[in-house]
Each structure stands twice: as C-alpha cells, then as structure tokens.
Image: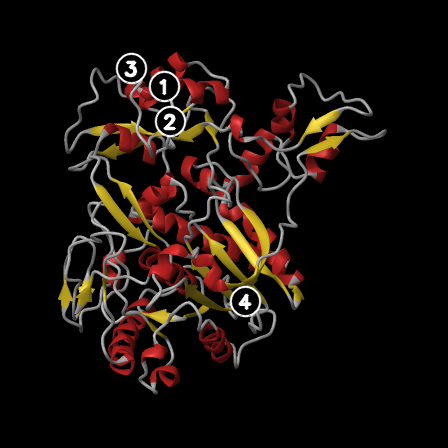
Amino acid sequence: MFRLVYFLAVILLCPSTLYAAKSSPPRDMEPLEYTVRSGDTLSEIAIRFDVGLRFLKRLNNLKSDTIQPGQKLRLRPTSQEEAVHVIQAGDTLSSIALHYRVTVNDIRRINGIKGDRIYIGQKLRLREANSAVHIVERGDALWEISRAYGISVNQLKELNGLSSDRIYPGQELKLSDTPSGRQATYTVQAGDSLGQIARLHQMSLAEIIRINELKKTIIHPGDLLKVRPMRWLELSEINWAALQVNHAPKINLGNGPYYYSRPRTADQLSKTYYEDHPRSPRETYRQASLLWQDFERKVDTMGQVSNQLDGWHIVIDPGHGGLDPGALVSTVDGNGNRIYVVEDEYVFDIAMRIYVLLRLHGAQATLTLISPNHLIRQNLPPSMTFVNEKNEVYNSESHNRSNRRSDWPRGRNLKTRVTIAQKAFKNTSRGKRVFVSIHADIDPKSPEAPLVLYYEGRMGIDRTSRQFARELLPALGAGARVRGQGLGVLRNNPADFKVLIELRNMAYRDHIWALRFEDLRQRDAEKVLRGLLDFAKRGKS
C-alpha cells in the first residue's frame, strides 16, 4: 500500500538534525592569508600551509620566489578563481562575468552559447587550458587525475611543485612539459548530448568541438569522440553484472534490478510520494538477509585485488533509510522535465559499492542496513530516479525479533547503528576498527564538496577521529573539508576511527545531477576506498 501523504516534519527539518545532538561552531577553518616573517622562504611557506609552490605564486601574482618580511600572501583560492560555475536562480551572463572577472563573450565562446539564455543547473566553464593542463574542479583528487592521464602522482607533484596530495578548485596542473596531452575515445550512446559528454569529461563545449573538428553540435549513436580521459567514468574494472543474484526472482528495470518485488512506479513521482513499509520488520529482515547472503557469496567469488586492508573491519552505515528518506529534492533533467531525488536510496547504492571495494582489498565489512528487494542498482537513463521505498531494515536479527513498527530505521533510533557496530567489532583488533556513515545532505551553509564530520559535542572532541577525517581529505578531492559536530551516530561508537561523510550536498544542482549517474556514484565510492587505503598504508609506514 502506498500513500500520497507525507510526514511534514521530515520535509521541514534539515535531515542532519536527525543525526546531531548539538551543532558546534566550525573549528577547522584553514588560514586564508599569511604575513611573511624574517627568514621565511616561499617554498617553506608552501609546505607549511599545504599549497603547491606554483599555485602559491599564481595566487599572489609572483614572478619569482623572492618575498619580503611583512608581505601578505594569499594561501587559498576564493570562489572567484574557480574554473566552473553552476547556474543558480537569478544568475545572468553579465553577473557571472562580473563575479569571475571574465567577459560575457568569453563565457559564450567557451560554452557554445548564443545570446543570453541560460538555465538553472547549467554548468559553465569559465576558462580553458591546453590539453597538457588540467584545471581542478571541486571534488577532483590528485590520485584520480594521475590515473586518468596515466601519470604517476609523484610526477604530477614534481611538475607542479606539490609537497602533498592536496589540491584546490581552480588550480591548474601541468600534465607534461609538452603542449600535447593524452586523449581517450568516447562512443556516443543513445540519448547522449554533446554538452553532457563534455560535462562528464570536464571539457568545455568549445574544446570538444575543436579537438573533434565538428561543424555542428549534432551527434549520433556510434560516433567516436576524442575526450579527456576521465577514468572515473569507467566504473573501474569490476564486473558489476557478475554480482547480480540468481537465486532470487529478478525484475529487470531501468532503475534496478530488483528482486522479489519492485516499486509500483517507474521513478519518484514527487517530493511527497512514498511507498509504505511492509507490515512485518521481522519478515522483511528475513527476506533481506537471504538476499544479502546470496550477494556476499557472489562477492566471495571475486577474490581479492590486494591485501592492503587485511585485518581491518569497516562498518559502512548508509545514511537514513527505512521510515527516514533523508533529503528529498527536485531538479530537472536535460529536457527540462521535473524529477526527484531521494537521499537514502542513492547513498545506499554508494554504500553497497564501497562494501564491494573494501572486500576486494581484504577488509572485513559490515553494512548497518539491508534491503529486501535491491542491491547495487543502475538507472538508465539517469532521469529514471530511485523510488522512496520505506523497506530497508537494520542488519540485525535480534533488533527485528520484536516485530514492532518502531523496529524500522528512523531518525531517532541511531543507537541501533552503534549497537550493530559494537557487535561487528566484538572480536576484531584494536586500531583497525572504522565506522563510516555515508550521506548526501541538503545544507546551503556547507561547501559544494565532500564534508567529513567527526564527533564534537557534550562529551568533548574525538581528536583521533578528527585527525582521521583530515587525512581523508586528499582522497576525497579539491574543496573537501572537515568539521566537528555532535552526531548521535558517532557518540559512544566503539570504532577506533569514526566519521560521517557528506559525499554530496544536494543544496547544489550539480551534486543532484551527479548522484543520478551510476559512474559518478562509483567515483564517490572509490574516493572513500582510496582514503581508507591511504590511511591504512600510512599506519603501516
């Protein structure tokens, strides 16, 4: 049975409040400026404040490494130095050009715009670079750029005067000492548009037209296009189809597959639409557990890619779920049609992908929630959104034994997630227990980039997890930040290292857009994996 009635409180409350006891003011703001002291050198300042030497010089319009005591140096770029802008309500080409100190004609030329018509959610590139330069966007990580262009991280760091793996939005990274760069080939699929292909490969429309010598923007399925080699669009080398379960009745849909049952609608109908939970948490858990056990056996057959996480036990907590959908937002697709995105459905898919990646690298892994009718899902086309089904259950037989309505996951029973972690860590080694809660909130006060939260509240500051959060930043990409907050899911949590990661922020149209693409959800999962691999490696060294 489904209803068109909704809990008004869920819509009105910011979903993060369901996870927080008390919010604390940010304590992790990085310095934006530095006054040079006697004896300072530019290279030492670059190392001390984790900013590349070449980028530091560019930020301060320096032609040489000479600096003077008392001189003020900018340490971080502002939004005006970024290379892309996503159109917000009220934007005009003139206001955008004024903000970024570029010309309207340049914006038109780079983005293939005729006239002044732009639309909310459109992504405009603000400057171009030759193929031997990559302009960093929010979320780009050095390791991803290295993999994309076939250059080692050490080479990239040497070419760009980097002392660490931190990079920043708007930073220009040299890819080689020659003006020619590496390209890949993309085969046009049905439904593709040239603008979307350019956007997915972090290219301007002008660039993709130029390197392909196109006379028009019309393309056809099967056409081959030269593009920037963004490897995160390849869904890694995992055969995801091999992980589909065969023992349960399977229903193939564009936003599936589903097992046993499917949503009653093809996609999310509105901000208030939902399909109610089954009557029995116990029976739902039984079905979900059988599906999950089949899936685990499939993962076991894939073997291991590495043993880098041997001995580690990592609990992955998909945010919200059950009665609590988290953020629920509306947007439009490429044709201007209204579509709706439900946070818990998408972060569950990312959490499933993280689970598989962790297992492939030798970790023990536990999910706090499981579903009775879906595992890893696609959505083709991306406008075919996941439906708000209130059927996820806690991954705990004892919790569902009482078979009460209150057993369903909801905003106020976060202790159950902590209890699942306690059980998972019962016989595991200290120092190798990690808890990661995955979210995609809607918070206009937070950055348009991953945000890693550690516990800071009435019980004090979890300094170990704060350091862990900071060490995840390079893997999560440019613009990623940390913050302390009194989160209930982290309070009294037995993990040695515990964080909540807002991988996406649906206050921003571009993040709503990215969640809908399977390949970009996979990219988010691989960022979390990379952060954990790097952290484990540093612990061994």
Query: Reading the chain from its start, which is encountered first: label 3 or label 1?
Result: 1
To which residue does mark 1 refer?
110
Mark 4 neighbour class, 10 Å CA radius: few under 14, some 14 to 19, many 20 or more:
many
Q: In the rendering, at what x and y percent does residue 194 appear?
A: 24, 28
Q: For marks 2 and 3, give the one nearer the viewer.
A: 3
To which residue does mark 4 refer?
490
Q: Amino acid at mark 1?
A: Ile
Helix, strand or loop at label 1? It is: helix
Q: Which mark is residue 124?
A: 2
Query: Reading the chain from its start, which is encountered first: label 2 or label 1?
Result: 1
Q: Tell me the CA gap for discs 2 and 4.
A: 38 Å
Mark 2 neighbour class, 10 Å CA radius: few under 14, some 14 to 19, many 20 or more:
many
Helix, strand or loop at label 3? It is: loop
Helix, strand or loop at label 4? It is: loop
Q: Tell me the CA gap for discs 1 and 4.
A: 45 Å
Q: In the rendering, at what x and y percent does residue 103 appear?
A: 44, 13
Measured along the vertical axis of the image, is residue 81 above or below residue 250?
Answer: above
Q: Amino acid at mark 3?
A: Gly
Q: In the rendering, at what x and y percent does residue 249 appear?
A: 14, 70
Q: Are marks 4 and 3 in contact (CB under 8 Å)?
A: no
Q: For marks 1 and 4, give the one nearer the viewer.
A: 4
Q: Tell me the CA gap for discs 2 and 1.
A: 8 Å
Query: Reading the chain from its start, which is encountered first: label 2 or label 3?
Result: 3
Q: Residue at x 16, y 64 (%)?
A: 262
The answer, for residue 127, to whether it is visible in the render is: no
Q: Which mark is residue 115?
A: 3
Q: Quadrant of the C terminus?
A: bottom right
Numbered marks: total: 4
The front one of 271 and 230 is 271
In the displayed structure image, the side of residue 152 where residue 124 appears, left or right: left
Q: Tell me the CA gap for discs 3 and 1.
A: 13 Å
